[in-house]
Image: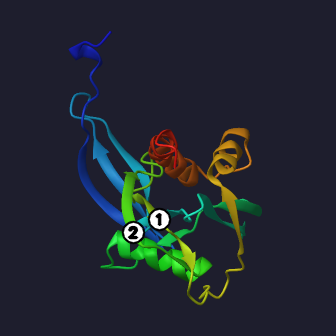
Amino acid sequence: MHSPENTPSRWERLGSRSLAKTRIFDLDEIKFRHPVRQTERDFVVLNPPDWVNVIALTSDHQIVLVKQFRYGLDDFALEIPGGVIDPGEDFMAAGIRELREETGYEGSHAQLLGTVDPNPAFQRNRSHLIMVTDAKCTAEIAWDPDEEIEISLLPVDEVLALARNGGITHSLVLNALFMFEPWWRELKGRGV
């Protein structure tokens, strides 16, 4: 039961200092004060750029997937295309660019499925999840120097089953599929 006594307080930000700057994120220490208890604490916050992930749907209802080695996982991961949004770049343009660069696929229409906070406990960026429809392989692949990607197509229902049974474990990919699934169910309900 909700009562005023258990409503969380908004902490007051007092200041910050940079701990490290890396190629993929900045690390800051931020001092906050609790407004009621007046306690002060230092928290570590990651500041990566915003990201974009793309569900690319072909006209025959397959999803473009990428499999690549992930250094943090020290293993391979099955995912949807995605990547970092460049400074000043629109997230929709970034998604279309990442899809084209990683897979060679382009589509006729792009729309936002949603935006999520990857880990708001200590991370400041956002991830934009978009869908591109009528995806076709039309462009040259342009991988980053450390990228090696296996590209595959799977029917939507197989991808959703993989997400449910642990074959896809990347949380942002799961978020995108969760947001895509109602759209897919509606499309299937119309007999398409």
Mark 1: which amino acid? Answer: Thr
Location of mark 2 (residue) = 109
Position of residue 9 measured from the top left corner of the image (x, y, whole percent): 25, 31
Estimate how packed mark 2 is, as few (under 14), some (14 to 19) or many (20 or more) residues with alpha carbons within 10 Å: few
Q: CA distance from mark 2 to mark 1?
A: 5 Å
* Quarter that holds the N terminus: top left
Can you see residue 70?
Answer: no
Q: Residue furthest front?
A: 191
Q: Residue 29's image quarter? A: bottom left
Measuring from the top left, give residue 82's x and y in whole percent. Answer: 53, 68
Residue ID at (69%, 42%): 161
- Please indicate, yes or no, whether residue 35 appears anywhere in the rendered image: yes
> Which one is in front, 174 or 12?
174
Q: How many marks?
A: 2
Q: Counting other residues with Cα less than 10 Å from the Cα at mark 1, is it few (<14), some (14-19), or many (20 or more)?
A: some
| 5 displayed left or right of 156 | left
Using residue 7 as the reference point, say whether residue 83 is left or right of it.
right
Element type at marker 2?
Answer: strand
Residue 185 badge: none
Residue at horizontal 50 percent and vertical 52 percent from the top: 176
Q: Which residue has dot 1 on it?
A: 133
Cβ atoms under marks 2 and 1 closer than 8 Å: yes
105 left or right, relative to 71: left
Q: Is residue 7 above or below residue 10?
A: above
Q: Residue at horizontal 47%, vertical 46%?
A: 187
Q: Position of residue 12 (x, y in %)?
A: 22, 44
Q: Residue at x 32, y 51 (%)?
A: 31
Q: Which residue type does callout 2 highlight?
A: His
Instruction: State the residue in front, 181 or 26.
Output: 181
49 left or right, relative to 13? right
Q: Secondary structure at mark 1?
A: strand
